[in-house]
Each structure stands twice: as structure tokens, then as C-alpha cells.
Amino acid sequence: MGEKREARIYDRVAWRYDLLETPMEKMLFSRLRRELLAGVHGRVLEVGVGTGKNLPYYPPGVELTGIDISPRMLERARRRAENLGIEVDLEVMDVEDLPFEDRTFDFIVVTFVFCSTSDPVKGLRELGRVLKDDGTILMLEHVRSENRVLGKLMDWFNPLIRWMFGPNINRRTVENVEKAGLEVVSVENKGPKILKKVVVRRVAG
């Protein structure tokens, strides 16, 4: 199988990715990352680790694995981990085809990832497979607006945004979690209503 489109896109923008997101990081994202990761422990998988923006916020003692489809994004994550003195296993990997054994991780962390995956339901099913029975998936994602007019606008503009920058702006990620056979424990708006924290677990039984 050839290189995925998503890998090519993020390889291309890796050198300027952090710069593009600096305003939102300072205004909102850094605080949300800190809140999201405050309670994680044990064996942790971060999907779409990108340039490593979450790395400063992990509590001490976690056994962290970070994966991303883009080698160039991971190069930047490795440099960030070295600068922070953080031990993390960083691997080029596709969330839709994970090599880990079933029920491996206590926590899975996902921040702004399922807007970009080619088959989000397949990727979410993989997360459910590698999550322990009592494990938790913590997601921070932007989704399609529930507002009728704004949602339609996002649908119309999505092809252009996807072509220019890579992500989809109209993903129905909470619905995709349910389609993947996982349990949505909670959904919380974080600032704008299109930005949501989603807590997910395996379906009991």
C-alpha cells in the first residue's frame, strides 16, 4: 500500500504547523491539554501525537507511546521530547491498523485527530480493541456544528479546507464513536460548541 494522503499533507506542513496554531495554543488549547491529561496514568497511547504539543502536560510516571502517520511531524515530537527530558516511544503508525495486542492501554489520548483520518470509524474500532476493559479514551475534537445553518456551511466549505489544510471541518465524531461500538460516557463543550471533550469507554459486557 502506498503512502496515505494524510501522511503527505502533514509531512508538507510539519515545518510550519506549530507556528500556524500558536494563537489558538496561547488562547485556549494549552489550557485544555493540561486539563485533559491531568489524571492519566499507567500505560498510555497518544494517537496523532503530531509535533508533541501534549508532551509537557503528561503526569510523571506514565508509560507513554505516541504514534503519528507523518514521519516529519514525529521528528519534531522527538526533538520536543528530548528538550523536555521526557521518555516516550514514538512510532510512525496508522490508527486504522494498530499492531498492538488487544486490551493493552489504560488510557488513549486523542487531540484533534479524527477530523483527519480517512476512515474514522475503523480507527475508533481499533482504539476500542487496544483499550483495556476498564480503560478510558480521552478525546478533544472539533466537530460539525449542530446549528443547522452553520453545519451546512461547514459541509459546503469542507472540500476546500480539506484540500488546502488536510482536516475535515464537518466530522460527526461523537456519532462515529457510537458507530464504532464504543460507549460515550460524557460530552462537554470547551469554548465554542464545535470544540468538544469526549470521554469514551468500551461497552460493558
Image: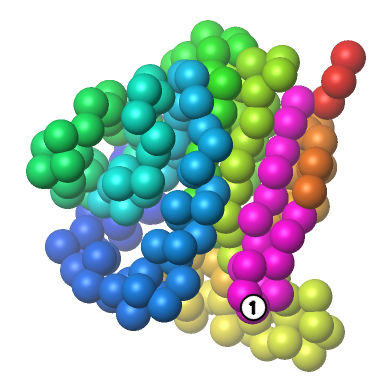
Q: How many marks?
A: 1
> Residue 110 at what x, y percent from top left?
52, 45
24 and 97: which is toward the camera: 24
> Residue 205 at what x, y percent from top left?
88, 14
> Residue 77 at what x, y percent from top left?
22, 44
Relative to residue 11, is residue 16 depicted above or below?
below
* Residue depicted at 46% across the width and 29% down the height: 45
SS of the residue under disc 1: loop
Q: Amino acid at mark 1?
A: Pro
Q: Left or right: where does residue 122 sit relative to residue 115? A: right
Number of residues whose C-alpha sits closer than 10 Å to that of mark 1, classed few (under 14), some (14–19) or many (20 or more): few
Q: Is the image coloured rainbow, by chain, by secondary structure, or in one colour?
A: rainbow
Q: Which residue is mark 1?
A: 192
The quadrant holding residue 10 is: bottom left
The question of residue 190 being in magenta is answered with yes
Relative to residue 40, is residue 98 depicted above or below?
above
Q: Left or right: where does residue 93 sit relative to residue 135? A: left
36 and 5: which is toward the camera: 36
In the rendered structure, which segment of residues is drawn in magenta?
Answer: 187-202
Residue 78 in sight in this render:
no
* Residue depicted at 27% across the width and 24% down the height: 89
* Residue depicted at 65% across the width and 23% down the height: 135
